[in-house]
Image: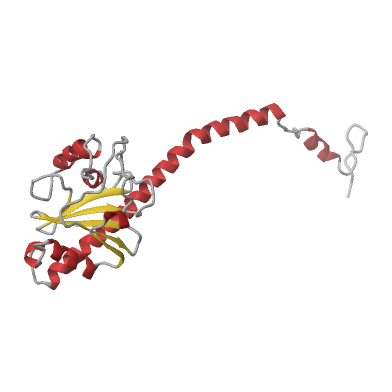
Amino acid sequence: MNKICINGFIPAKDARHAGAFSNVRKIAFTLAEVLVTLGIIGVVSAMTVPSLMQNHQRKTYVTQLHKVYNLFSQASVQYMNDNNALNMKEAGITSQTAADEFIKKYFKIALSCGTDAEKCFAAGEYKKMNGVSAEVAALAGMTYYILADGSAIGVGYQSSGMQIQIDINGKKGPNIVGRDVFAFRIYNSGVIDEGGTDAEPPLSAEQRENIYNTYCSGNSQDTWWGCFGKIVNDGWEMTY
């Protein structure tokens, strides 16, 4: 191969690479720059991580609540079908005894606590989101159970249907109404909806919102009403 002569000078074999290497910049960060960057990352993390964790916890609570709701919904439909009835009252829910028989037949029970709420619930520890005490309801003859999934339920018969109280994770915390603690009603018609009202179900979004403002986010003691309906209104999202 003939070598090319440039102005009487013949370049070395690899001389063509020299220019390329001479253009390479050596990039490095000073210690101060690294520390500033890490500081910024730390500040951003401190601002965003708690919010992400709170949102995750809210979703976890709603998922557990929805699971219990589905258990009651499916059991109610099965109960009415088994008794060839159009509603829960016709199917036989006309007393506390009948309500207990319904629970024992259609749910997997880990512990039956009878009328002693303290055996199944964290009695004395429940409160509202604003810190106001909100203990387990004690309807005459109300019975309490722990289901196989670890959730605690209270079942009380009323003329309008069955009042259901739920602690979705049993005695574990936080034991706050609207977080892991809720209540709903299985009406005589078989509809599961918010309680705390004499209105016929299904309730309107406005009715549920009013009950939420009165009981769940209000200062009313010893009631767990209002939070379930708010979650239903908001498309099974915990927005509060």
Q: From the viewer's side, name the closer residue of 41 and 139.
A: 139
Residue ID at (11%, 72%)? 83
**Picture quadrant of residue 218:** top left
Determine the image quadrant of residue 221.
top left
**Number of numbered labels in the structure image:** 0
The residue that appears at 29% across and 48% down in the rendered structure is 181
Q: On the picture, is 226 further left or further right than 93?
A: right
For residue 94, above or below residue 221: below
In the figure, is residue 202 to the left or right of 234? left
| Residue 87, horizontal then vertical, whole percent | 9, 63
Q: Please tell me whether residue 127 is drawn above or below residue 80 in the rendered image.
A: above
Q: As rendered, which of 12 and 169 lies closer to the eye?
A: 169
Q: Is residue 68 above or below residue 220?
A: below
Depth check: 94 or 1 in front? 94
Q: Residue at x 33, y 53 (%)?
A: 63
Q: How is the image coloured?
A: secondary structure
Q: Quadrant of residue 219?
A: top left
The percent coordinates of residue 168 (x first, y second) are 32, 54
Q: Position of residue 60 (x, y in %)?
A: 37, 50
The C terminus, quarter of image: top left
Position of 66 with respect to 80 (left or right) is: right
Q: Position of residue 51 (x, y in %)?
A: 43, 38
